[in-house]
Image: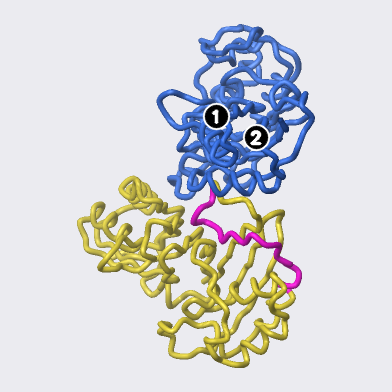
Chain colours: A yellow, B blue
């Protein structure tokens, strides 16, 4: 068996998420079916992160073990041909050691959340951004975001369905920048709780709209209470951008 | 009657083009029906440029005359509400003098053509870029593009269906820049012939692939012969970005 690492880009709009689901299409299933068509083997893909329905990836990492001899470039070409017309692309493919694991070897994960801050309706980016019609104060959002940096109990920012053993995580980076009509939130950590990025973006949007102060964000964090959170940002704007090993 | 200028963004994928067609949806029809729903008036929209099927706009300018009293902001809000779910958005709306004309007053038009230069298939941008799998030399393309600047007979770069009285046009700007995997071609002129931008991009792609030299571009221009052109770039990557008055 040879272990291959795949760098995968996907548009999450038509998928129930990364993970195989009984009741709808998933990125994992699309890739596993393509691997089976190439190799005749029933392989299982492991990913650095299991994204939710409607969440996208610019640089997801996954691995798969294949018995049939095949060159990495040939494998990626064959997978891309078989994945059509699903909006999933293998950007890179390489052989890795047998003990390399896309999920367990991953030392850092980075997400980008994209807000289109304008009143006019979406045209090109339906399902690819969160549209916020009222003006957001990105500088205030960035300031408040710094309250969340470091090691904390993130229970407030955790889905009720989160399967993580502990709500304690270390957040390394949470930056908010404005680029014209866009407000981009970039988050990096060793790992995240379920819905953590979308929950943090939801809280920061309250700050951007002037409804919350940075102190309200601190208070919500310290409350360790999911009920303190006004809303989750929708999946549309969330992109998994990088896995670090 | 009051004349309103509209700044319009649209995703050209579902449309037969700007202009009303008997056999398919057009941006003009979508907007005219929205105006009629707001005002009860059968108004005609005039645009700075009539884009082809599948061509997009980030900043098309159009005007319309309306008898019913209405504030510009209210008009744009109502049009945007009625345009849903069509991917057309009115970004700005203002009252202009009665002799201001979106097409005839326009002193300059700017287009951007977007190439995604990578081997992996498209995910997020199907219909929004031209995918070229083999590496393009953007610097060589830019150099060759400068051969087309100035006042020339652009017969080689003109559709057989072009209705312009003369094939002589002045090209003010044709820049090719690489941004990562993207190659962007920016063109500006007082006006363009039908298919001129896509034809020029098709020729520059030949240069980028190493099949043509800059001298071949000059020779094709001077031949004034449509047969000299290897291909038109597809509409997917073409965006009308600005009209100058």
Q: Which residue is tagged 1?
A: B18
Residue found 64% across the figure and 54% down from its top? A119
Q: Which chain carries label 1?
A: B
**Magenta segment includes A131:** yes
**With B217 as the anchor, is A142 left or right in this view?**
right
Q: Do labels 2 and 1 share a chain?
A: yes
**With B25 as the anchor, is B39 left or right in this view?**
right
Identify which residue, A66 or A216, lies in the foreground.
A216
Across and down, in percent, residue B114 comes to: 58, 38
Residue closest to the far bottom: A223
The secondary structure that most of the magenta stretch takes on is loop
Image-quadrant location for residue A153: bottom right
**With A64 as the anchor, is B86 left or right in this view?**
right
Identify which residue, A87 or B70, lies in the foreground.
B70
Q: Tell me whether the residue at label 2 lies in contact with that at label 1, contact meaning CB atoms closer than 8 angstroms.
A: yes
Across and down, in percent, residue A142 comes to: 72, 72
Give the residues in magenta: A124-142
Across and down, in percent, residue B161 comes to: 52, 13
Q: Which residue is tagged 2?
A: B60
């Amino acid at each position: 068996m040879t272990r291959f690492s795949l760098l995968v880009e996907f548009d999450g709009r038509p998928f129930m998420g990364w993970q195989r689901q009984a009741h709808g299409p998933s990125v994992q299933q699309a890739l596993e079916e393509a691997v089976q068509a190439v190799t005749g083997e029933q392989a299982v893909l492991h990913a650095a992160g299991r994204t939710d329905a409607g969440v996208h990836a610019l640089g997801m990492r996954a691995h798969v073990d294949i018995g049939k001899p095949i060159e990495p470039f040939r494998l990626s070409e064959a997978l891309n041909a078989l994945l059509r017309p699903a909006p999933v692309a293998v950007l890179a493919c390489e052989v890795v050691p047998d003990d390399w694991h896309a999920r367990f070897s991953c030392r850092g994960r980075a997400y980008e959340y994209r807000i289109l801050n304008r009143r006019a309706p979406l045209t090109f980016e339906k399902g690819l951004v969160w549209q916020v019609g009222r003006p957001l104060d990105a500088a205030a959002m960035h300031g408040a975001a710094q309250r969340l940096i470091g090691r904390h109990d993130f229970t407030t920012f955790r889905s009720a369905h989160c399967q993580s053993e502990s709500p304690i995580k270390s957040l390394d980076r949470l930056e908010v920048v404005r680029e014209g009509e866009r407000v981009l939130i970039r988050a990096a950590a060793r790992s995240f709780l379920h819905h953590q990025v979308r929950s943090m973006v939801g809280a920061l949007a309250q700050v951007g709209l002037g409804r919350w102060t940075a102190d309200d964000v601190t208070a919500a964090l310290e409350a360790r209470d999911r009920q303190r959170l006004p809303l989750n940002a929708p999946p549309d704007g969330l992109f998994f951008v990088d896995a670090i090993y």
